[in-house]
Image: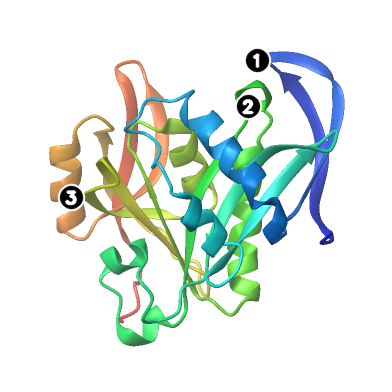
Amino acid sequence: MTETVLSGHLHRCDGRPSAAVPYVGRWIEPQEVGGVIALHHAVREAVAPDLLCRETDAFFHEHCNACGRILGLFANEELIGYGVLGLPAPDQESFADQFGLTSEQRTVVATVDGAGILPRWRGNGLQRRLVAVRVEAARAAGRRIAVSTVAPGNLPSLRNLLAEGLTIRALRTAFGGIRFLMRRDLDRSPKPVTQGRWIALADTSEASDALMAGYQGWNLSDATDGPRIWYACERDAPKT
């Protein structure tokens, strides 16, 4: 069994406050992948089909061996959550192909891939912790770029990726729906310029125009007329 890489307590269950339940996170062993696959299907059944990619069994086996790692969360010895980290080889196909990376950048890219939490344990901040640990694991593996994708309607995932420093770089049709392409450069701390604008989350046309003009999406905020994202250019962006 691999060592514990994160731990804490669950304080909500089935959407309500509950007695504290300890949990731990560790990297999944190959013989445990079947549990991750079962959890993936359970999570998919609880969300709209266009919000979460349906992965193959082979995808999970590959990411627990040749091209990545899977972080598992356990409470009372039950697998309650997972997060996939991809560490693709430069010539290996992955969704990182959509980011227009140079040959050099492809050698240092990691994919913050699919994740899921059992519905009864949502609301405990687990998904953000899954993002944070995978980003740090990518850095420890010598990767300097972390990329991810998320459906605009998947507000929890979008909020957590933004909170961990990934910004929206493009809008594409992929994985059966519209997806934001998100990226974080792990070797620097970019900041947005002060001049920018809020764009309604539902206004994918205006968002696409802003992204094509060089803006990035930095923050998600709730407004009376619906969620919106702050788009701005990067301050003092280095040339690549």
Instruction: Indicate the position of residue 164 as horizontal and vertical percent values.
Output: 54, 51
Residue 29: quarter of image: bottom right
Amino acid type, residue under disc 1 in the picture: Gly
Quick check: 97 left or right of 81?
left
Q: Are marks 1 and 2 in contact (CB under 8 Å)?
A: yes
Task: Identify residue type, mark 2.
Answer: Arg
User: Which circle marks residue 210 in the picture?
Assistant: 3
Q: Nearer the viewer, mark 2 or mark 3?
A: 2
Labels in figure, total:
3
Q: Which residue is mark 2?
A: 122
SS category of the residue bearing label 2: loop
Identify the residue under disc 1: 15
Give 38 or 75, whichever is nearer the viewer: 38
Mark found first going from the N terminus, 3 or 1: 1
Residue 28 in view, yes or no: no
Q: Image height check: is 106 above or below 112?
A: below
Q: Is residue 152 left or right of residue 6?
A: left
- Residue 139 lies, in percent from the top left, at 60, 72
Q: In whole angstroms, how far apart are the C-alphas of marks 3 and 1? A: 37 Å
Q: Residue at x 61, y 62 (%)?
A: 64
* Residue type at the position of mark 3: Ala
Position of residue 56 measured from the top left corner of the image (x, y, whole percent): 44, 49
